[in-house]
């Protein structure tokens, strides 16, 4: 964690001439962009995997007709087809899973009063009037209210998240519309995959809850990463 703190501090020092007191917030956004840039090859691989899975649908449909009365044989045949074509049904989850450590690292970094036995100086940094270690609930309870200086920072974040969520919803719906549904019951190619596909368009709206409960620094990571994902998906899945 001290390494991450040092990195954020150094980035904040570099950005100080441009962003002043909000340099640490800008550093977190830059840190997030660097993480997502490192994960971009995985996102490209996930997009290729999605296209490959779409191309397999006619063959999967034929297997369903062939093994309609034998769900277990159908499941084995579908999994064998994915193995033969070197297509992972869950490859699209890798970019999200791989960035979780960075998110939790920032969460703990801005929730800990000390780092390596020393006071956590990062907690003194702000985004405009909002402390990076604070939460939305603190804004509601400190007397400033949702329309105070700190509250307006969160209002801007919520507005950004809502816009990105709507954009992601439309993009995800467009990429999944017309795609043959995964077989259900015992014949489902991967248990739970059908349910994941159905709720996927709504996942972006959960970001609103995350932004409301985590420290502002972690919220900035989530907003930046979600925005990156929405743009990246629109480009890769067009």
Image (cartoon, helix red, strand yellow):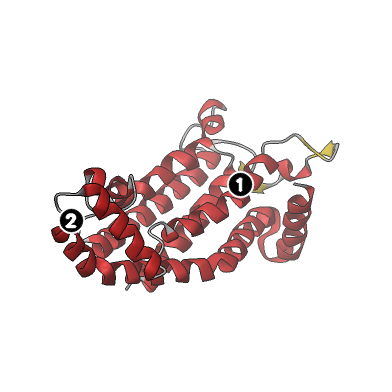
102 relative position to 196: left or right: right
Q: Secondary structure at mark 2?
A: loop
- Residue 107 at what x, y percent from top left? 62, 42
- Residue 206 at what x, y percent from top left? 40, 43
- Residue 133 at what x, y percent from top left? 65, 39
Q: Answer yes or no: is residue 178 visible.
A: no
108 relative position to 52: left or right: right
Residue drawn at the location 61% of the way across and 37% of the way down:
134
184 relative position to 132: left or right: left
At label 2, counting other C-alpha atoms closer than 10 Å, the crowd grade (few under 14, some 14-19, many 20 or more) is: some
Q: CA distance from mark 1 to mark 2?
A: 52 Å
Residue with the mark numbered 2: 67
Q: Answer yes or no: is residue 33 visible.
A: yes
178 relative position to 160: left or right: left
At label 1, counting other C-alpha atoms closer than 10 Å, the crowd grade (few under 14, some 14-19, many 20 or more) is: many
| Closest to the observer, 18 or 40 | 40
Q: Secondary structure at mark 1?
A: helix
Residue with the mark numbered 1: 217
Q: Is residue 138 above or below residue 34?
A: above
Residue drawn at the location 69% of the way across and 43% of the way down:
109
Q: Which quadrant of the structure image shows residue 74?
A: bottom left
Residue drawn at the location 51% of the way across and 35% of the way down:
213
- Residue 95 at what x, y percent from top left? 50, 59
Mark 1 vs mark 2, foreground winner is 2
Residue drawn at the location 67% of the way across and 40% of the way down:
108
Q: How many marks?
A: 2
Q: Is residue 141 above or below residue 96?
A: above
| Closest to the observer, 174 or 227 | 174
What numbered label is drawn on residue 166?
none
């Amino acid at each position: 964690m001290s390494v991450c703190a040092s990195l954020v501090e150094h980035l904040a020092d570099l950005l100080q001439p441009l962003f002043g007191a909000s340099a640490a917030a800008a550093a977190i956004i830059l840190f997030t962009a660097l993480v997502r840039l490192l994960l971009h090859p995985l996102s490209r691989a996930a997009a290729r995997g999605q296209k490959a899975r779409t191309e397999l649908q006619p063959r999967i449909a034929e297997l369903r007709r062939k093994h309609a009365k034998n769900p277990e044989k159908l499941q084995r045949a579908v999994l064998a087809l994915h193995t033969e074509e070197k297509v992972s049904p869950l490859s699209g989850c890798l970019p999200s899973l791989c960035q979780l450590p960075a998110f939790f690292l920032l969460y703990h970094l801005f929730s800990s009063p000390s780092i390596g036995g020393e006071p956590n100086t990062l907690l003194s940094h702000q985004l405009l009037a909002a402390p990076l270690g604070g939460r939305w609930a603190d804004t509601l309870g400190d007397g400033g209210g949702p329309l105070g200086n700190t509250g307006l920072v969160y209002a801007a974040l919520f507005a950004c998240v809502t816009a990105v969520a709507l954009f992601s919803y439309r993009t995800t719906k467009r990429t999944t519309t017309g795609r043959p549904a995964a077989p259900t019951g015992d014949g489902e190619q991967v248990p739970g995959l059908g349910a994941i596909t159905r709720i996927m368009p709504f996942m972006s709206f959960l970001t609103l809850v995350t932004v409301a409960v985590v420290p502002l620094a972690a919220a900035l990571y989530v907003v930046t990463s979600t925005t990156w994902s929405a743009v990246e998906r629109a480009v890769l899945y067009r």
